Image (cartoon, coloured by chain):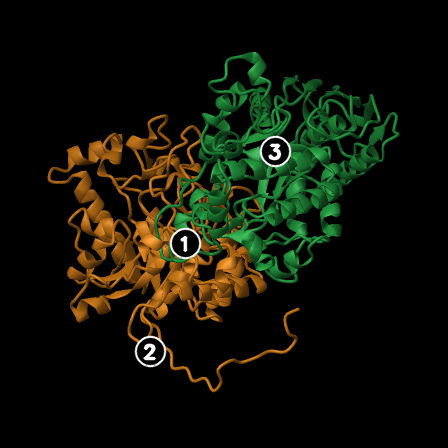
Amino acid sequence: MKVAVALLGMLSCAAAFPWPYPAQFDHSNCTIKADSPTIVAKNSGSALLDSAISRYTAIIAKERFWPPADYKLKKPETTGTLGKLLVEVATDSEDLNMETDESYTLDIPAGGDATLKANTVYGAMRGLETFSQLLATIDGQRVVRGTPLHIEDRPALAHRGISLDTARNYYPVSDLKRTLDAMSYNKMNVLHWHVVDAQSWPIESKTYPELQTNGAYSVDMRYSYKDVSDIIQYGRERGIRIIPEFDIPGHTFIVGQTFPKIMSCLDKQPGWDKYAAEPPSGQLNIAKPEASEFAIELVNEYSKLFTDDVFHLGGDEVNRNCWAEDPDVKEYISSHANATVETLLADFYTQVHNAVAKQEKIGMSWEETLFHSEYAPPKDTLIQTWIDEQSIPKTVAKGYRSIASPASSYYLDCGHGAWLSNFDGNSWCDPFKSWMHVYNFNPWANVTDPEQQKLI
Amino acid sequence: MPPSYQLIKNAPVKTNDTPKFVYRGILLDTSRNFYHVDSILRTLDAMSNNKLNVLHWHIVDAFSWPVESKVHPELTKKGAYSTDILYPYEEIKKIINYAKSRTIRVMPEFNMPGNTFIVSDAHPEIMSCLNKQPNWDKFGPEPPSGQLNIADPRGSFAFDVITEYSRLFVDLGFHMGGGSLNLDWWKEDPVIELYVCDHPGESIESLVKGWFNQTVGKIQEMGKVPFAREDSMLNFGYETKNTTIVEAWVSEDLVSKVVDKGYRAIATSWNRYYLDCGRGSWLSNFEGSSWCDPYKGWQKIYSYNPRAKITDPAKQKLVLGGEVALWSAQSDETTVDRNLWPRAAAFAEIMWTSSIDPNTNSTKDIGKVVQRLTNHRFRMAARGNMPEPLQPLWCIRHPESCKHPAAL
């Protein structure tokens, strides 16, 4: 009977093991008590490490998580007691970028002190998260199951992100922080903040304050400089980079609420679908030097506020009709030999990507900049693919790094039907992407060259 | 900053109001996943904000038995997901009273004989076809399979359930379920085989009809009005007294068929009103759509009038109302607000007033409807609910600009 119970215990204890599952996980079958493990840094010159240890100490002190798979189990028998968790970090470096080493090893013996070793404080954070997930409280007794256990863990992919749109609808700062917490529980390390779009401009601008005054949904639905800095710091403490996106030249109707003169095709109705992917239509007027000057000022301003190395310039769903029918664009083209909408667009991209480089940032663009324009982005530009899965192999074949986010697998908003008031059909990207569908997507599919695979 | 005083606009205001449908309900499944009492109270508040008046509580199903039973306490002991995850008698009474003070009736559903696997945790001896794997699909609409053994001579279980819960739940209505039954499910049960052999003239079908006869009889004996799903009424040629109220869920056309047979009908057609649809299948190894995908958008709900295809006014009166449903394979208290609202609010307006503007007698402009609905959604949010947004907020101040040109 005891054997059967023990086996049952092991079967369900597998359910309680960490998520994501570590790269290498050796475990045995001893259950040890873990009533109040403390976490101690062996060597600490890092405030970030101290804050991470405080944070996990608090999580562990408060949490008495009983995995639902084990609801019917009785208090487990234990054969040892967990002592302290000793944390050892090889360097004090706090650099957080795509090259940051997030690996760690974690050893929990069948009794006594456990050890967590990492090269960087961020690796230590990943290990602390894993450690916290190995604690389970069964019928009132907190234990670690499966000891002695040995974990060697590292991510397969360097950029593991969530893209969040805070322009179509607003998310309070507390929601963003809670999302960063949730990301840290899942070892995700990039928040791609799609902060503005056609519908609203919630973020403060010191260069053009009216952008926010005119563009935010309300005085309460805003992000101040301080909010942004808080969020960046909150992310950093969790090993999460914040990459801002200022999507240009399309998706910019809201800029027209302040600077109508630098815009084309503002809010064409009722046939907005000729000029934009969704209402309200509006793009920066690429025939006007003031439009690219404006864009460059945005790059300059927000490159300083956002501390990450990468700056996302958007560039998706750029509508050619919008400019073909614009009087300034038509005028420019007729008075400049060899000028076309395409050449104007390529010029625009050249200017803004140069501005990004001048700020010593790496540019990031949606795939249309690479595949649907005459512009060739700088070779270090990160190309985010969304239109279909085949864009990934095409991107790396051209030698660019690819951030995979195909709508068909990774767009989590899909499956709610269309949002247009008078249309009860599906949205463009329905159906809902279930967790199995997300789980089954392989970003390396159809990429066989190992050098190209590294670019994903 | 919004002003610190309150305004009444367009005064003087005079309102004369009465609902178009008397039964305006939400079905909540608390068996597949659990909803703590506070989330149910919050749902009742939200219903009262929308003049909805029936909580159809689908309290048990194959997966769990969270409701206390004093007659068969082992049902809850074995069948609840854990010792914390259940509804004791006092909590049920609390919910019923809370609802009553909001003019909401709480009608329980004890679906039998199908979808009753969970009873086997306590009483396997009265069951057929328990948890057949891997081919559960031959024995039920979803795993785990299991239904009451309708030929079991010990079968007083169903009567015990009806008796006990007719007393606990004070509402006049008692829902006996009866949906999605497949007679084939009982074919492999040895007790049934034996019974049919021993009783020439009897078949699985006659056993099922007998079952329904007795169930309806027992419910009426307890002084209640039976509610049932239409497939049990229409598929087996079973005729019950037309005091049974029938829920038409399989298709919109069945609402007409139900009233044609003289029954009172509740419209709950899945292709309009099943709010859980649109999240894909919940089976672990299958990444396709669920049976009832796609998601039912508020527009689809708002454009449906359950009486639309019924011309005879006497039959129209038999359509008592409708019900939106939240089946909980992929929902619990963490998602209840956004799954129900504001789509149930769109439904609530059709149930109370319809989509016709009473002042002009023509269909309301949909841009203005969603503007008012979005405002209402924000008001509900301010009162502590968490309804999902329907559109970019930009659209609320530009109701004309968020329409599809081709659909104009």
User: Comparing marks 3 and 1, which lies closer to the viewer?
Assistant: 3
Disc 2 and disc 1: Cα gap in Å? 26 Å
Taking the spot 28% from the left edge, 31% from the top edge, the residue there is B138
Q: Find disc 3 in the rendering and name its residue.
A: A364
Type of amino acid under label 1: Leu
Q: Quarter of the image containing the C terminus of chain A? A: top right
Q: In terms of image quadrants, where is residue A357?
A: top right
Q: Position of residue B275 (x, y in %)?
A: 40, 51
Taking the spot 41% from the left edge, 53% from the top edge, the residue there is A272
Name the chain letter of the residue that bears numbered label 3. Answer: A
- Identify the chain drawn in green: A
User: Comparing marks 2 and 3, which lies closer to the viewer?
Assistant: 3
The hue of chain B in the figure is orange
| Extreme-left residue of the structure | B201
Q: Which mark is residue B359?
A: 2
Question: Is residue B74 something that shows in the picture?
Answer: no
Q: Earlier in the sequence, mark 3 or mark 1?
A: 3
Disc 2 and disc 3: Cα gap in Å? 54 Å
Are the residues flagged by discs 3 and 1 from a single subunit? Answer: yes
Q: Position of residue B342 (x, y in %)?
A: 46, 58
Q: Position of residue A154 (x, y in %)?
A: 67, 21
User: Comparing marks 2 and 1, which lies closer to the viewer?
Assistant: 1
Are the residues flagged by discs 2 and 3 from a single subunit? Answer: no
Q: Residues within 10 Å of mark 3 (few under 14, many from 20)?
A: many
Label 3: state its secondary structure: strand
Type of amino acid under label 2: Asn
Type of amino acid under label 3: Met
Q: Residues within 10 Å of mark 2 (few under 14, many from 20)?
A: few
Looking at the picture, tell me which residue is in the foreground, B366 or A211: A211
Q: In terms of image quadrants, where is residue A62?
A: top right
Name the chain letter of the residue that bears numbered label 2. Answer: B
Q: Quarter of the image containing the N terminus of chain A? A: top right
